[in-house]
Image (cartoon, rainbow, N blue to C red):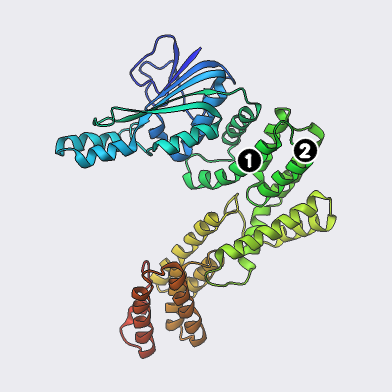
Amino acid sequence: MKLNIGCGFEYKKGYVNVDAYNNTVADHMMSATHLEFDNQSFSHVECIQVMEHLGAAKSIYALSEIYRVLQPGGSFLLVTPDLVSSFKSFIKGDENNRKLIMNWIYGLDTPGMSHKYGFPKELLERMLHRAGFIDVEIKELKPKSVHPSLRATCKKEDSKIHQTISQFRRALVEDKKVNLDDQVEVIEKESLIQELVQLFMKAEDTLDDRYLKAIVESSAVCSPKVGNVFLASSRDAGIVFSSESNRFIEILETLDSVGFIDVLTDLFCKMPIKPGFQSETFDSVIKLGKQLVRKFISDDQSAIKEIRNNALKTNEKGYTDYFSKIGLELISNRKIAFGLKAFGLGNLDDAINLLQEGVRLNRDSVIAFWNLARLSVLKQNSAKIEQYYSAVRNLLMLKHPTNYRNHVRILDQERKFADEGTEKMYSRPLHTY
């Protein structure tokens, strides 16, 4: 059998035609990210002008699904707009051609017709290889027209490892361990997934204790849920022995059930607040987390008890199910936004508390520290005034070395006015700088 994904109005004889939005001629309505077919059902798959509608995150899972349903040795044809050639044509084109090219780049404002992403040739090639495809060839189609495209052809290698990875990704979506509508979450969890895949590739045919422990350590301090599904998929594929895999799966299930990610988040918040040391603090918490996990793996009852006790005492519950720098920054941004709202409404004490929570989660936030400085002026807290304005100055030097002097000039002017009690610019929240 052959599969045609995204048929639109064009029915291809001899193919199973599917589309996510248009049922005019489609045999089945379904998304490319969740193909409702058995493993290895098709000898050939075509996906013409579809990937650009999915976006960067969903495309990873679409390619994984295509790999899953393709038979070993089967062929895959993909066509998508050529982003680089499109921009070149736009620059050189007249007004009419530019309008056409803009529609080609961004799509149409119609359900299923807008373009969410463009794929340069090198990115498309890397994504196909990561999905497990071989013999990848990419050609430019009509590079000087208003509809330039990339045509990629490749084959599926008979790889038990990549087949297992594609089934693992499907399980993540089915079990709602990954939300494909949240691109930030997908990309953040993708970093962990690629780490697990690399361990998988190194282990080759069988995941022994050494690799299983590494998988548990890495996933436990980022997302026990993802690690759990990964090990379960490996076990079901026969890549690990059942008795070994079940024990490690139980460890990850326990860590997930007690809220180990919340424990790590809470531990991060309780670490000393040093402006500009976000990465160093994060790495320290990861190191401490892995130490606890290693003790748990070795059946150290004191470590298990410590994790459970910390879980009961944690103040940071349910913000996220993965622990990462970006995840912490997103939580921080929400708290800072509420803090600035409270500041604007004149609720100064609430604003201070929320902004302090924000900097506990993101020690690199210039906005949070700057507003805390302003609030300290209004509250006439001289010790905090010096502390927070100094933090802002140091962060500006660290984060904006090329434009440092301009930012500091504004900061010093504000500090001068605050000392003099004039120009009440510090009496309102600062949203940007």
- The secondary structure type at the circle numbered 2 is loop
Q: Is any part of residue 424 visible from this angle?
A: yes
Element at label 1: helix
Q: Residue at x 54, y 26 (%)?
A: 67
The image shows residue 203 at horizontal and vertical percentages of 71, 37
Q: Is residue 246 above or below residue 384?
A: above
What residue occupies the far bottom of the structure in this picture? 420
- Give the mark, 2 or 1, whose residue is nearer the N terminus: 1
Residue drawn at x 65%, y 53% as measured from the top left: 261
Could you tell me which residue is drawn at 64 percent across and 68 percent down? 270
**In the depicted structure, whether residue 263 falls above or below residue 399:** above
Residue hosting label 2:
208
Measure the C-alpha gap from mark 2 to mark 1: 14 Å
Q: Amino acid at mark 2?
A: Asp
In this view, the residue in front, 284 or 228, is: 284
Whether 358 is drawn above or below 9: the answer is below
Q: Residues within 10 Å of mark 2 (few under 14, many from 20)?
A: some
Circle 1 sits on which residue? 198
The x, y position of residue 123, in whole percent, is 44, 38
Q: Quadrant of residue 426?
A: bottom left
Res. 348 visible in picture:
no
Characterize the local packing of mark 1: few (<14), some (14-19) or many (20 or more) Cα atoms within 10 angstroms: few
Please provide percent x and percent y for residue 91: 22, 42
Which quadrant holds the C terminus? Answer: bottom left
| Residue 361, disc | none
Residue 314 in the figure: left or right of residue 342 = right
297 relative position to 233: left or right:
right
Q: Is residue 427 left or right of residue 99?
A: right
Residue 202 image point, x, y percent: 68, 38
Q: Amino acid at mark 1?
A: Gln
Q: Are marks 2 and 1 in contact (CB under 8 Å)?
A: no
